[in-house]
Each structure stands twice: as C-alpha cells, then as structure tokens.
Image: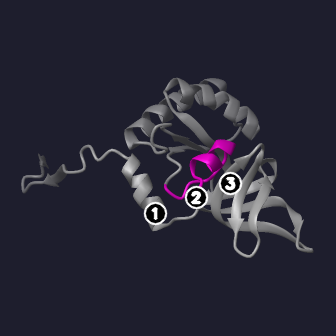
Amino acid sequence: MATIEELTALIEPVVETAGFELVRVSLITGPSLTLQVMLEDPATGQMKVDDCAKVSRRISALLDEVDPIDSEYMLEVSSPGIDRPLTRLKDFERWASHLAKVELADGIQMNGAERKRFQGPLLGTAGTDIRIEVEGLGEVSLPFAGIRTAKLLLTDRLIAETGALLSEEGADEIEEETADDESELRN
C-alpha cells in the first residue's frame, strides 16, 4: 500500500491542474477505509460542492489506473471547512490572529514541565516555527515539523471572515416541489 507521502505526490498534480491547492491527504481507518482529500480554492480557502465533485472524478480516475491502495476504500474529497486543519506553514500566516489549537508529537520543556498542547491566537511564523500566544506563557514558538495536529477554533469572528470570502451566488434561489411532484425554481 502507498504511503501518505506517495498518495500526496500522486494526487497533488491533479488538484493543482484543476486550479486548487491540496490541504491534506489522510487515510482514515474505521468500519471501512477512507482516503480523505481536502482541497481549497486559493482565493477563498473554501470549495464549492461542484468543484469537489469535479476534482473527485479526476482523482478517482487516476487512482483506478494506478491502484495505489491494495484494499477496498472510499474516496472523500472535501473542503477543509471553517474550523479547518492547519497543515502547511503558510496556513499559520494566513490565519494569524485567529484562535487555534496545536498539539505537538513530542512535548517540549516549558517552565519546568513538559507540554504538548497549546491554544491561543496565532501570531504567524518565524522561519520554520509557528508562533502562538498562550495564556500564562505569552508568545511561544513551536517547531512546525513537530506538530502532530493543528486546527482553527470556531469563533464568531472566524465565521464572519470566512463567510465574507464565499460567494453568495444562487443563495436567493430556492428549489421547491410542487403538488404534481415537479421541481420549480423560485427567486
């Protein structure tokens, strides 16, 4: 079976050719295996459902041809969502000033104790470190390479700013079913 790095190298050119950026590729185990591919429009940081479907078909065709996963799996292509994972160094710059939760793979010594989890407003990056303001500690620099997981925390400000980036095209159209079971589009 291909590694995440190999799957990413395989999928990323398809995503970029379609005009989008790859956010994350992961294999999720559970009752069934899921290959999760998160992507975004570089202009908005989000994705439209139609664009996800279009890229999903392209990725699926490639995976059918190359067959890098030796067992049954489900392909999931999606937007990172509002409380998105932070997976690239540039994410910490783009979302500076927003609240985030960061967990390191290995703890670091701070004030005589080992600490792995940090939460607070992002302050951007410094080289290959991310900067975050942590209550009681002030500004903390964390090695990007040591991050296990990081994600934005849902706040009213994040919702407002993310919503402002999205198009409202078609938002005033409502599809209703009439009495004779035909769909009707109303403005």
Residue behind mark 3: 29
The three-letter amino acid code for the residue at tag 3 is Thr
Q: Residue furthest front?
A: 138
Confirm whether residue 1 shows in the render.
Answer: no
Residue behind mark 1: 157
Does residue 39 lie above or below 171 as drawn?
A: above
Q: Position of residue 39 (x, y in %)?
A: 54, 40
The three-letter amino acid code for the residue at tag 1 is Arg
Q: CA distance from mark 3 to mark 1?
A: 33 Å
Q: Earlier in the sequence, mark 3 or mark 1?
A: 3
- CB contact under 8 Å: marks 1 and 2: no
Q: Earlier in the sequence, mark 1 or mark 2?
A: 2
**Secondary element at tag 3:** loop
Q: Earlier in the sequence, mark 2 or mark 3?
A: 3
Residue behind mark 2: 97
87 to the left or right of 154: right
Point 60% across, 53% down: residue: 96
Q: Give, as a single range, the part of the protein colored magenta.
A: 82-96
> Which mark's residue is nearer the viewer, 1 or 2?
2
Q: Give the camera-side residue of 68 and 171.
A: 171
Q: How many numbered markers are drawn?
A: 3
Q: Position of residue 41 (x, y in %)?
A: 48, 38
Whether the magenta-drawn stretch holds residue 89 is answered as yes
